[in-house]
Amino acid sequence: MKRLLLLAWFGLAVASAHASAQSNVRRVEVQFSAGASEANLAGTIKGHQFVDYTVRARSGQSLTVTFKPGNPSAYFNVLPPKSQAALFVGSVSGNRFEGTLPANGMYTIRVYLIRNAARRNETANYTLDVGIADTKAPTTGSGKTMELLGVWFGAASGDTGDMSILRIGP
């Protein structure tokens, strides 16, 4: 009987923690106005809350995110479709991301407070500018594959007619 009660208590504790964690997540689908490829968003987070902004994009499109936080402990990450492994980590790389997307699907821009600020229940107001654009493929150029410290990279250069492009990616 004790074992059954302990198991029931544990199940309730886990369910409660899961429900609490889920209540800290707010999901917002980024909507572009007709004919626009940019959206300007504003929001507030507090403590352990975070906001997941989702945007549908295609492989090869360019995603640009500019983040302006009112609290220096607020950051954003960019997550690819169906993955929690970030393509971009704001606490390491800063408040701007610009990159060519590797896959089709729903990308997530996660806004959050770093752990010490979240524990102090700090608040952050912010603005987030999100843009999606088709990239212009080089019309002429060359490519090469290289290895550095066990990671293979592809590098390609080319000319679109109005600019020269160098692309490097894993």
Image (cartoon, helix red, strand yellow):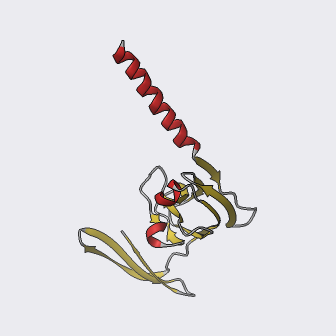
Percent coordinates x, y for residue 69 in the rendering:
61, 68
Looking at the image, is 95 positioned above or below residue 12? below
Depth order, front residue of 49/165: 49
164 lies left or right of 145:
right
On-image quarter of the C terminus? bottom left
Depth order, front residue of 23/9: 9
Q: Is residue 19 visible?
A: yes
Give residue 55's quadrant in the image. Answer: bottom right
Percent coordinates x, y for residue 114 in the rendering:
49, 60
Depth order, front residue of 145/131: 131
The residue drawn where x is 59% and y is 67% is 71
Q: Is residue 114 visible?
A: no
- How many numbered badges does the structure rendering display? 0
127 lies left or right of 113:
right
Looking at the image, is 76 positioned above or below residue 168? above
Percent coordinates x, y for residue 131 in the rendering:
62, 68
Looking at the image, is 115 positioned above or below residue 170? above
In this view, the residue farthest toward the front is 120
